[in-house]
Amino acid sequence: MKQANLGLDLTTKRTRKREFLDEMNRVVPWAMLVGLVKPHAPDGKRGRPPFALETMLRIHFMQQWFTLSDPAMEEALHEVPLFREFAGLDNWNMRLPDESTILRFRHLLEKHELAGQMLETINTLLRDKGLLLKAGTVVDATLIAAPSSTKNASGERDPEMHQTRKGNQWYFGMKAHLGVDAASGLVHTVRATAANVHDVVEANSLLHGEETDVYGDAGYRGADKRTNARPVKWHIAMRPGKRAALDKNDALDAILDEIEYLKASIRAKVEHPFRVIKRQFGFVKVRYRGLRKNTAQLTTLFALSNLWMARRRLLKV
């Protein structure tokens, strides 16, 4: 009986996971992102030789795309040849990163706040390709659930998370606030707060400063009157009850309803990145304790969502 060649990939089927990784491999600006990390990386003069920065960055991104914890990512590298191939670890006798190595790399990114720099680098690339404009911004927020159980080492819930009510439903966790390009739906600003912080509080911090028009739902009423208000034109949605009371047979009310419809069609762009991270990447609950770590993960997710949403146009360019 012949011995199996464990280093040979006999897969011929182009699975959805392989297609996804192939597309992301082609659109992620690896060299630019590695250049951001390199000045902060250990010199490797002590201990075992470190893994290549691009390898660790690829592993970090796979964690975000497939919702994998550090231990689960280590196991996946041992069990899934496709993941090793994507990370550049497909040599059958090559040493693989353990969960501690993966954890330390993530802490390195968090310590030097590199997630925000990665988002800016990716957006600069998209802007240079003509995919990101600056004339208008759409603002919105979404709730991200956090574990409410107290069965942990501290015996309490995360003190930086909070509960809030939306309609008749109570939620515990954090809130992700986004500033999105009104033309393309690509994210340019990410802010994270406890769930009980009102949307309008973060409204002006979601602007990049070069837009002339801002669109938001009814929760952003009064954003133009706050102390940190920017000199822009706010297009805020009419309250649902007031719009429902419009008489469609009245000429003026019909025009107002049409205006609200047009504003809603622009605001809809902000739902696309939310859909990508929650449905495409499977991010529906925070993984870490504290806002700082979760903000870094959110920023990374939205940076990657920009590449995913623009991938076909990037590949054509």
Image (spheres, rainbow, N blue to C red):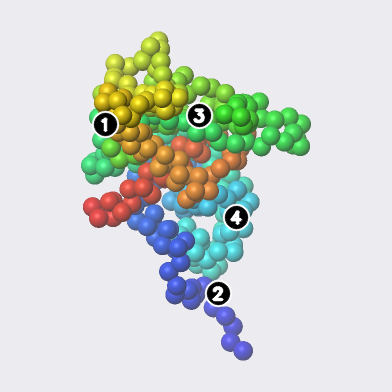
State how far apart marks 1 and 2 are (Cα). 51 Å
Relative height, residue 63 to residue 228 (above, below): below
**Mark 1 vs mark 2: which is more N-terminal?**
2
The residue where tag 3 is placed is 192
Residue neighbourhood size for the residue with mark 3, other residues' Cα within 10 Å, grouped as few (<14), some (14–19), many (≥20): many
Q: State which mark lies toward you, 4 or 1.
A: 1
Which one is nearer the viewer's eye here, 300 or 33? 300
Disc 3 vs disc 2: Cβ atoms closer than 8 Å? no
Under circle 2, the secondary element is loop
Q: Amino acid at mark 1?
A: Lys
Comes first in the chain, label 4 or label 1: 4
On the image, the x and y values in percent for residue 225 come to 38, 11
| Residue located at (50% from left, 67% from top) | 91
Q: Read off the residue under disc 4.
A: 74
| Marker disc for residue 6 | 2
Disc 4 packing (10 Å; few <14; some 14–19; many ≥20): some
Per the image, label 1 sits on a secondary structure element best described as loop
Q: Identify the image quadrant of residue 237.
A: top left
Give the number of the mark in front: 1 or 2: 1
